[in-house]
Structure formats: C-alpha cells, structure tokens
Amino acid sequence: MPRALIIGGGVAGPATALFLQRDGWDVEVFESRPEPDAFGGLFLNVATNGLAVLETLGVRERLLSDAHHCPYMQMCGAKGQLLATVPNGPAGEPERGSAVVRREWLNLVLREAVDAAQVPNRWGARLERIEESPTSVTAHFSDGTSAVGDVLIGCDGVGSVTRRWIDPQAPEPRYAGLLSVGGFARVEGLEPTPDTQTMVFGERGFFGYLVREDSTVYWFANPTHDEVDREALRTWPRDELLAELREAHRNDPYPVPQILDAVVGTVGAYGVYELTHVASWHRGRVVALGDAVHATSPSAGQGASLALEDAATLAQCLRSGSFEEAFARYQQRRQPRAEKVVAYAASINRNKRVPRSRLTRALRDAMLPLFLRGAMTDTRNNDLYNYVVADEPARHSHR
Ligand SMILES: Cc1cc2nc3c(=O)[nH]c(=O)nc-3n(C[C@H](O)[C@H](O)[C@H](O)COP(=O)(O)OP(=O)(O)OC[C@H]3O[C@@H](n4cnc5c(N)ncnc54)[C@H](O)[C@@H]3O)c2cc1C
C-alpha cells in the first residue's frame, strides 16, 4: 500500500486524505497547529462547486446543517442604494447557491470525517524540510521528528514550505493592498437576511455582512491598507482595530455603523494575498495543492472550493501511471482553472480598493452600476460554479 504524507490540516489536506484513503492509500495528515480549535478563523463562502466535492466525500449535508444558504449577493453603494443583485452560484438556480459557514465548522466537519475514516492526524507537526531519495521522501518536522512516505503532498497554505522546496525560485504571494477584518455581531432589531449577503462599496472601504435567523451577524471589512505583517495583525488590539473601522465606515448606510458598534467576540485580521502563477506544482515525489500553489484572495469566495477540487483531481490522477506522470496530469488539469479564478478575484479587488482621489472615486462609483448591470442573469460565472470533478472508481493501482 503506497504511503502519502499530507502536510496541512486546513481544507485541501483532510480532503486529499479522505480521497486517497478511499483509493487504498496509507495516509497521515501532519498539521503545524498545536491543537484542533486553535485556528477558529472567521467564516467563508463555500461555493456550489466546493459543495459538490463535499458531497462526493459524503459531508455536504453535515456542513449545510449549520450554514447560511446564500444564493444571492446584494451590492450597494455608499448611500445604501442597491447597485445590483448578483448570483452567488449558477445564475437562475438559487437552490444550488453557495453557503457561508464558520471556518471552524468547515474544519470540524472535515476533521470528523478524517477521524471516522481512522486517518492518523498529527497536530503540532510543522514541516521544516523535505528530503527525497530514489525510493522515498522524508518530511522533517520542527520538533525533531520525521516521517517517511512514497509521496509528500503539500497542502500547507499560502506560506507553503512545500512550494519553496519544489521550486526555490517560485514567486512569493503578492499583497493585494487590502486587509480582511471580520467577526460576529448582534444588532438589536436587525432583520435576518436569508439567502443573501450584502456588500457595500462604502465611502472609505468595502464592507460585507449577512444576518442569520438567530440574528447573529457575520461581517467583514476590506480596508485599503499598507501591508502589515502577520504577527502585528494577530496582536493588533481589538479596540484599536474596531475604532479604525468605525471611523472609516461612520458615514456608511444602515446597518454598517450599527454592526461595528455591536461586535461580539473575536475580531480577526488577515492580509489579502494572491499567488498568480507558480510554474511548477510538483517535483519528484512531492506535489502541492490549494493555496500553496494558487492562493486566491477571498474576493471570489472560491479559495476553499478550488482546494477541494484540487484534492479530488489529484486523487483521480494518482489512479494510474507513475507518481510523476500523475502529478503532471494533475497540474495540467488544474492550473488554467485555478489561475483564471485568481485573476478574477484580483479584478474584484481593484474595485474594492478605495481610490485615492475624489475624482477616481466618483468615477468608480459611476462605473459600478454599469459594471454590475445584468449581473443577475449573467451566466458568465456558471462554469465556475457548475464544475464537477467526476468521482471515477479506481482503475488499478500503479507503482
Ligand atoms: C480572511 C479570509 C477570508 C477568506 N474567505 C474565503 C471565502 O469566503 N471562500 C473561500 O473559498 N475561500 C476564502 N478564503 C481562502 C481560503 O481560506 C483558502 O483558499 C483555503 O483555506 C485554502 O485551503 P488550503 O487547504 O490550501 O490552505 P489552508 O486552509 O490555509 O490550510 C493550510 C494548513 O496548513 C497548515 N500549515 C502551514 N504550514 C505548515 C507546515 N509547515 N507544516 C504543517 N502544516 C502547515 C496550516 O496551519 C493550515 O492548517 C479566505 C481566506 C482568508 C484569509
């Protein structure tokens, strides 16, 4: 039985482990975080195409049992005027719309499935170095331990060690000029927004929110900001962060200022990064998936779904041929789609960044309704949402 070392227990890692285990692999997941709930994260959009992969894994319904079904996005201007309603899923098929979930819930649902499949999952295992021989690959971890496998699959996210091992010249993720700050709130009297997320192109920043049936508000803001390193973001005092956001959004329409006045619990802050083109996604017995090779900014709501598609595709490719042939086919199948989505998300970011001069801001605000016109019936994104990775049965094992 071939053995796969899977580095990273975010989205791509557990999904890859589940797919490969079904195909008869011996798999183990190694995650750098010390314990399961240490990375609560905020919430994220799991798009129709990502939900399709979760269905193949048998966990879609479990995920949707605590999700905000969200087939529509309402785009509003700085005065609260409705600019457009945009489908968050295939146009004209709201029942197949995407879902917004808490990240910790998505992580938990995947983790439950990994545990149920009895896949070993090691926490506190930070990959530091990879060593390859003609017959095996060894992962060395920062605690001095190591593991040996036939292949190493890097699902280690945007700061990937695996990517750098595959190609030391690979580009670093590029900062998109925006932060993503968000959390939860409870606003007295605010109506639930079933089926919908609202996005506001505010006077001095972009803001998004949805209100669940139990009145919990999920909110995020994308302030245009110079780059801030990860540690500084992590330790940014919550009150200071909120004070900046309140100031930036104080003239924005109801309920944006009210939400910022009613924040409960943790406020998370992240830099928005993009990785547009990584020439090689594999080398020898090592391959990388998800954000490690095509980090897409959150703006398209597709990063997690692409990571899930990668996992399903890699498992399929590994059903025949040598490892290297399988890795090459996987990259060939995935790269054009992933890069298209990264570019699409980057184009959305251009509209989110607040123009520096009043004139360009006025121009942007005048252009937005034109840009968004017809969006509701626009089927341009249908190929994004309708993508399905067919779940073929294993033909034969190789090696
Ligand atoms: C604020 C924010 C909002 C987002 N919103 C959305 C959204 O709405 N919809 C969407 O689809 N996507 C969204 N994304 C993007 C999405 O989170 C990623 O695209 C997705 O998580 C990628 O999955 P992954 O498995 O490749 O990486 P990750 O989920 O980042 O998982 C990587 C894992 O590897 C671990 N790791 C890292 N280095 C090592 C190491 N050296 N050794 C061992 N383990 C390691 C990490 O701890 C982590 O658990 C958002 C991202 C951010 C930051």
Image (cartoon, helix red, strand yellow):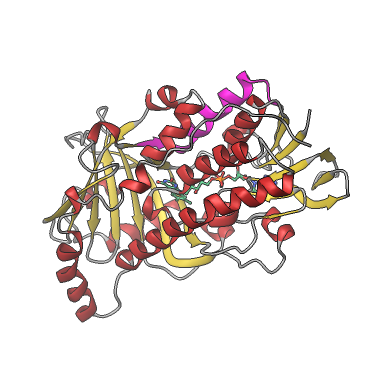
The magenta stretch spans residue 224: no
Q: Residue placed at 42% from the left, 33% from the top?
A: 52
Q: Residue placed at 49% from the left, 67% from the top?
A: 175
Q: Taking 88 as reference, is 242 left or right? A: right
Magenta span: helix, strand or loop, mainly? helix
Q: Which residues are magenta?
A: 99-119
Q: Position of residue 185 (x, y in %)?
A: 32, 40
Q: Quadrant of residue 373?
A: bottom left
Q: Position of residue 351 (x, y in %)?
A: 29, 66
Q: Residue placed at 26% from the left, 46% from the top?
A: 259
Camera sees residue 11: no
Camera sees residue 251: yes
For residue 363, above or below residue 319: below
Report the quarter where the N terminus lies: top right
Q: Quadrant of residue 320?
A: top right
For residue 252, above or below residue 195: below
Q: Taking 43 as reference, is 156 left or right? A: right
Front residue of 251 and 392: 392
Front residue of 216 and 70: 70
Q: Taking 184 as reference, is 378 left or right? A: left
